[in-house]
Image (spheres, grey):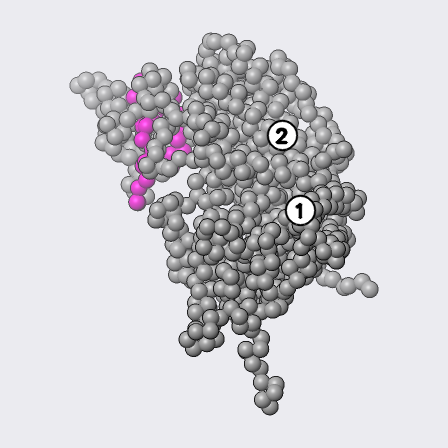
Amino acid sequence: MKFERYGIGIAKGLTVTIRHLFRHPTVSQYPEQRLNISRRFRGNELVWNKEKCTGCGTCAKTCPQGAIEIVTSTDMTENKYVVDKYQVDTGYCINCGLCIESCPYEALYFSHAFECARYRRSELVQSKDDMLETPERKVSGYFYPDKANKLPEQTLLVEKVTEKR
Amino acid sequence: MATIELNIYNLVNFQSIPPDWPGGFWWHWLFFTVVIIGFVLTMVMGVIYIERRGMARMQSRLGPNRTGPFGLLQPVADAIKVLLKENIVPDAADKLIHWLAPVVAFAPALMIFAVVPFGNGVLLADLNVGILYVVAISSVSTVGIFMAGWGSSNKYSLLGAMRNVAAVVSYEIPLVLAIVGVVLISGSLSLNQMVVAQDVPFILLQPLGFLLFFAAGCAEINRSPFDLMEADSEIVAGFHTEYSGMKFAMFYLVEYAEAVAISAIIATLFLGGWRGPILPPWLWFVVKVIIVFFAMVWTRTTLPRIRIDQLMAFAWKFLFPMSLFNLFITALQVLAGWPTELVWAMIIVNFAVMAILVLVWSKLFFKLGRGRIEV
Amino acid sequence: MAVRTEPFVLNMGPVHPSTHGVFRMRVTLDGEVVVDIEPIFGYLHRGIEKLAEQRTYTGIIPLTDRLDYISSMSNNFAYCLAVEKLAGIKVPERAEYIRVIIAELQRVAALLIAVGAFLNDCGAFFTPFLYMFRERERIVDLFEMVSGQRLTYNYMRVGGVSQDLPDEFMPALRKFMNMMPRFMAEYDRLLVQNEILIARAKGVGILTGEQAINCSASGPVLRASGVKWDIRKADPYSIYDRFDFAIPTQTTGDCYDRYRQRVEETRQSLHIIRQAMEQIPSGPVRAELPQLIRPPAGEAYAHIEAPKGELGFYLVSDNSIAPYRCHIRPPSLINLTALRDMVRGWKIADLIIIFGSIDITVGEIDR
């Protein structure tokens, strides 16, 4: 005799839900409880290395959104380009990471910061000085494994045991 | 014309009012009206909190926990928010009906509590037809809901209201038949007398009646799995799609006030109402109401929704014959004098009867085509 | 006596709780019964096919993320396969394995969402949906670890993947794989035998195998109708011919079968991942390619078995850095053509669950 039609399925479902009542919830409370983000985090901001950049403009050419604007002039005495203007409109940026991968001189990184909300649209534009590495604007390990290994390890939900109390 | 003067003293059983109560009936009336309104509002807030937190925990979430300690003030915050919202009335709406509908729906939900005892004799009116009054009054909200559906001139609202009317009309019958079993055993229609008669909670004497009443009650007040009158994934919000602000708050209140009311009726009819050891009677009553409500939350969290034709078929092909059987068997047992003499035999027999009937009728019900009826 | 009734038109969507995005259905109803339905879409049109003509071959990959945003990795995979076919690029061995693992994980994640959303449409108040989301969260965590993002991964590249897997990936994946069967069993307990779900979904919205083939449906929708067609077996791409897996099929093609089909496919995906985890070699993950790819003039069509069905990319090259034409065959759109046949004569509640059981993403329909 099969008991499939006599409310057994409903009873089984009810046991599953009631068991969840006594388990730890999976969620975390964001502002108090901060999880570590990925070491390769593709963040909202870019970090630019002033010394390494040669002003070649590969990043600007690669950007699918055209969010990077770079203006250079030639420094005849030292025989190299000087970056006059380097500006990223993070409002247009889709965080695809192609600029970072294409940079031949390892001068461009993602930042590891994720709380980059701004009140105005114009504040989203990062100029040259807003792109340097600071303690708040740490470098993310995207495309640079050596930098990734220095960052704190990502919090994973698989590590979080929710079955037992 | 003094002979046909409506005398309130004839309608109300006055045993419950203390003889030294100052001012007599009207003080009693005023006091209990205030108590009932306060009770319903606090209970609604409480059950909203319980539903949201309990459901969240069953879904592996936390639920509201920011407003006040443990999020206890969340219903208050919600109430304030919803009261401050703009009241939008659709252009094509029937303004008067649209305005009147929440009131018509809300009043009956409150009026049910007039006959629900919070303690021995602690109630507004110990009507000797108490349960009949409950059944009669609780169907009135349907009128309000249909007014809402019709008055807001929205197709979703109309569909929801039509579903609601169809469901309530069908489910009233098994609901009443399930009550009759309890009435037969207790020998009274007064809710207070029913509680007094429950030396053994009637859930043990009437297990099938309890199941039927629970299912029919859930359908009556649009709780899942019978919540297809406001099925959010199908018809957006059903009859209150076009309501906002205070009027929406009224409907929201109605929904939970009715849930509390049905929980209170179930607690009174089947779980022994205010009776219980140690704790004061009103606390027992509240605890039982919350337990019943939690069972509703639990089913809501787990079960999918059924379809309108299945809903009707469930009422007419499953609940209705089952409640007839239940009534018949209970009547036989009462005739044989079991409820007073052979209580334990009755418990065992009734549980066996419930198991057999549910099994047999489930099979038959599936043979009847699982409820697909042509419309 | 027959009651004279009059049909009326109900606009479902574009903003409706269960149209899975901005999708609109003009439904002609006779009371509760659906007489006719006319799907209207285009509310999410972004012109991805046209935009692709102005971007470099690498620059299109972020665009493909935004097609079916629930399974971005599969879209990346299909597109990269198309470009590799066009330019004749050989992908390193390790990259192939990484791609398969990631794509199958993505399939699990997308099918979980599909099942959860379907059950939510049935009216199980968010519970299965949230449970499934919890499991998807675990997968998304892994994706975040490898690619740095949680929705638009943009991980695969032409000729491989963007970076190698991090060291902590494999232990985490192993942990997930050990966990998953237990959760699958729990979901089965929760609703598979549920009488209400069976009453709601069994025999509802039947799509016969013949009908499914006629409207060129693919993926779980096709296989639930009993047609054994899976591109991973029928036209093996990447390295799928190396793995041992079954193609589950169902018989009747109703909503319940489509739901069961998705659950079974999840099991098969886990099986493939387990094999790939054992076999994965070490080595480079990206073929040596120039910054800008210039495939020879010609055309190529590559298709994969995406979670929703056959996802194809058709590229025409004129030997420049951008494709001359990029056409996308979205599974959602083509599966959706079966909707009208399935819903006529059923009720509104059935319309919602049939629509949910097809499992569409509007980002893919409108492109």
What residue is at 68 percent from the left and 25 percent from the top? C248
Residue at the limit of the structure toward the right, as seen here: C1
Secondary element type, mark 1:
helix
Q: Quadrant of residue A52?
A: top left
Residue A66 as seen in the image, left or right of residue A23: left
Give, as a three-letter code, the residue at label 2.
Answer: Val
Q: Residue C268 location, x and y as percent?
A: 62, 22
Q: Magenta stretch: residue C184 in it?
A: no
Secondary element type, mark 2:
helix
What residue is at 56 percent from the left and 32 percent from the top? C112
What residue is at 62 percent from the left and 12 percent from the top? C242
Residue B301 drawn above or below residue B324:
above
Q: Which mark is residue C49?
A: none
Give, as a three-letter code, the residue at label 1.
Answer: Trp
Q: Quadrant of the N terminus of chain B?
A: bottom right
Mark 2 neighbour class, 10 Å CA radius: few under 14, some 14 to 19, many 20 or more: many
Magenta-colored span: A92-120
Q: Residue B162 location, x and y as percent?
A: 65, 60
Q: What residue is pinned by disc 2? A: C263
Q: Is residue B26 visible?
A: no
Q: Residue C245 location, x and y as percent?
A: 65, 18
Q: Chain of mark 1?
A: B
Q: Residue C222 location, x and y as percent?
A: 69, 32
Q: Chain of mark 2?
A: C
Residue C316 as seen in the image, left or right of residue B74: right
Mark 1 neighbour class, 10 Å CA radius: few under 14, some 14 to 19, many 20 or more: some
- Give the number of the mark in front: 1 or 2: 1
Residue C108 as seen in the image, left or right of residue B280: right
Q: What residue is pinned by disc 1? A: B344
**Foreground pick, B130 / B238:** B130
